[in-house]
Every structure is written in C-alpha cells, then in structure tokens.
Amino acid sequence: MKIFRLKQWMKKLQQVKKNDTWKLVDLPEGKDVIGLKWIYKPKYKEDGTILKYKVRLVAKGYSQQPEINFNKTFAPVARMEIVRTVLALATQMEAPFINWMSNLPSLMENSNRKYMWNNLWATPSKKKKTKSYN
C-alpha cells in the first residue's frame, strides 16, 4: 500500500516539475513560510478494493496572516445560467472558444501560478502523516 502511494506521489511530483509550478530557492530574510502537505484520497473499484490514490499537494493556508501573507481574497463566481448561455452560443456559432475550454484547467493553473502566487514562500510539512480529503 505504501509503495502504491509512493508511485502516485512520484507521479504528482513529476507533474509539478514538468509544469514548472515552483522552484527551489533560498528563503529571503524576513519572509514568512507557508507549509505544504500531501493529501491522499483513495479511488475504489466496484468490488470495494482500492484502485489508486489521488494525490494533491496543498498549501496550509490557515497559517497565513491577513495583511502579512495576503491583502484581499476573492473568488470570481458566475451563475450557472450565464455559463450555460455562453457555452450554448459558442457551440451554435462554432466558435474556437470550445477548443480554448478544453485547456481551461491548465490555463487556470498557470494563471494562478503567474498572478496569485508570485510571493508565496512554502516549505514541505515536517510531519509524515497522510490524510484523506472529501
């Protein structure tokens, strides 16, 4: 079981490296550090046995302090009716917008990396616990 999780962990690390998500640097003087942790969620087969683990590397955002680690937080949200209307119009007009939508997850990941996380300093967790997320 540990070997299985290790393989998933290595696969995720390779993805992170390939996407140039972060780089290892020395911590500048006076900068606070946000911790990181690995989250494992089991995916099950129909018979109930574990098929694989989904692995996520997450920042311990709860350790951030307002006005020190961040100034403003917001989550832009669109109503579902608007999203459906835009997609219906784009489909009807055969717009190249649909091709762009297929790359949306990686585009969002890249925009987060470029615009939101430029000054985030993180360090891996010292604890070796694994937890599941829902």
Image: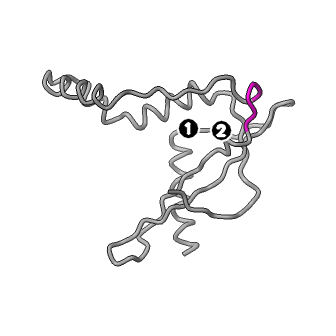
Residue furthest to the right: 29
Question: At 53% from the left edge and 65% from the top edge, which residue is drawn?
Answer: 7
Mark number, residue 23: 2
Task: State if disc 1 and disc 2 touch (CB < 8 Å).
Answer: yes
Residue closer to the observer: 15 or 105: 105
Q: Quadrant of residue 123?
A: top right
Residue closer to the observer: 32 or 22: 32
Q: Secondary structure at mark 2?
A: loop
- Which range is magenta? 64-68
Residue furthest to the left: 92
Q: Amino acid at mark 2?
A: Lys
The x, y position of residue 84, in whole percent, is: 25, 30
Q: Amino acid at mark 1?
A: Asp
Tag 1 residue: 20
Label 1 environment density (alpha carbons within 10 Å; few <14, some 14–19, many ≥20): few
Using the image, determine if residue 47 lies above or below residue 120.
below
Q: Is residue 49 left or right of residue 119?
A: left
